[in-house]
Image: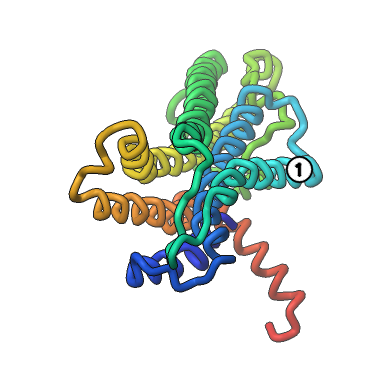
């Protein structure tokens, strides 16, 4: 939703303001809406990425714990939006119309510096720190599981050719319904005892299922890591230019306006590319989107 709102709301208004600069043609009410909304959606994107990283961390590191319920998920989503809104409240209060322009009017000069630093921490640095820790732990866990899987296969006495035949024979089996079997302890343990107690005919099947789970989880995490890296790269110019403006000599740089425009464009690029990454790099997300659209279509008589 935050990415969609950037495309539908932020970009059209921002283009209009770039054309009419320095005149503000949108009125006093929109002065307190347009720019804070842009910040709100960016904050929400960062908070959402951090929440997703926690969900992946919890699913892989503690797979025996139950997945979040619909109510819990709704609470998490609502919390990200509420927290994002609280972060932009000072900005909303500071914006005022002055001689036909929408300008910031902070009570003390230090307040704007504090707010800029706060945005950098909560919109960029802190989410990336949380995400970096979560995915580092997930990567270590996946490496451990891959190593244990290979050891299990070797301990089971399954030859490479026999394993490949079993894998090919089961390649037409439908995938598991959930992309992350968080309630399946065997996914985390990859227990060697299974390979010792099961019969020879069932060992290839168990190994095949474990490998499917591991491969599916790894694919999802890789996609999310790409999304996070894109977020870090695309938002970096905008963060740097505002920090330089408030704490350095950026205000005196003759190309400041051009760089600010470039920073805004990079933020928009991130929001526009995200849906393509989700849909293009993982079939689970494509199926989810298709399911939502199908439900909406059934409820709409015109479909």
* Residue at image point 61% right, 64% down: 290
233 or 12: nearer the eye? Answer: 12
In-image side of 70 versus 86 (left or right): right
Q: Position of residue 130 (x, y in %)?
A: 53, 27
Residue 105 visible to the viewer: yes
110 or 62: nearer the eye? Answer: 110
In-image side of 224 versus 180 (left or right): left
Residue 157 visible to the viewer: no
Of all residues, the one furthest to the front in this rendering is 99
Q: Position of residue 13 (x, y in %)?
A: 45, 68
Quadrant housing residue 186: top right
Quarter that holds the C terminus: bottom right
Of all residues, the one furthest to the bottom in this rendering is 302
Kindly identify which residue carries mark 1: 75
Q: Position of residue 138 (x, y in %)?
A: 53, 25
* Residue at image point 39% right, 43% down: 235
Instruction: Answer few, some or many: residues within 10 Å of disc 1's Cα (few below 14, many 20 plus, some between 14 and 19).
Output: few
């Amino acid at each position: 939703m935050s990415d969609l709102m950037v495309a539908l709301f932020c970009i059209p208004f921002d283009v209009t303001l770039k054309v009419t600069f320095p005149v503000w043609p949108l009125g006093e009410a929109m002065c307190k809406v347009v720019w804070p909304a842009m910040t709100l959606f960016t904050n929400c994107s960062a908070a959402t990425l951090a929440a997703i990283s926690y969900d992946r961390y919890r699913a892989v590191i503690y797979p025996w714990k139950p997945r979040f319920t619909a109510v819990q998920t709704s609470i998490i989503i609502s919390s990200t939006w509420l927290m994002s809104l609280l972060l932009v409240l000072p900005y909303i209060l500071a914006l005022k119309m002055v001689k036909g322009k929408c300008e910031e009017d902070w009570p003390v000069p230090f307040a704007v510096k504090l707010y800029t630093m706060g945005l950098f921490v909560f919109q960029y640095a802190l989410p990336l720190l949380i995400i970096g820790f979560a995915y580092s732990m997930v990567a270590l866990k996946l490496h451990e599981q891959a190593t244990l899987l290979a050891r299990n296969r070797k301990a089971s006495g399954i030859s490479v050719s026999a394993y490949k035949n079993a894998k090919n024979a089961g390649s037409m089996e439908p995938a598991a319904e959930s992309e992350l079997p968080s309630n399946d302890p065997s996914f985390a343990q990859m227990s060697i005892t299974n390979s010792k107690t099961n019969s020879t005919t069932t060992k290839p099947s168990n190994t095949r299922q474990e490998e499917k789970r591991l491969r599916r989880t790894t694919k999802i995490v890789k996609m999310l890591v790409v999304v996070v890296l894109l977020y870090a790269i695309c938002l970096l110019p905008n963060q740097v230019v505002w920090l330089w403006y408030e704490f350095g000599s950026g205000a005196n740089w003759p190309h400041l306006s051009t760089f600010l425009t470039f920073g805004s464009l990079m933020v928009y690029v991130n929001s526009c590319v995200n849906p393509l990454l989700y849909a293009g790099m993982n079939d689970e997300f494509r199926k989810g989107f298709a399911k939502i659209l199908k439900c909406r279509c059934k409820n709409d008589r015109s479909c």
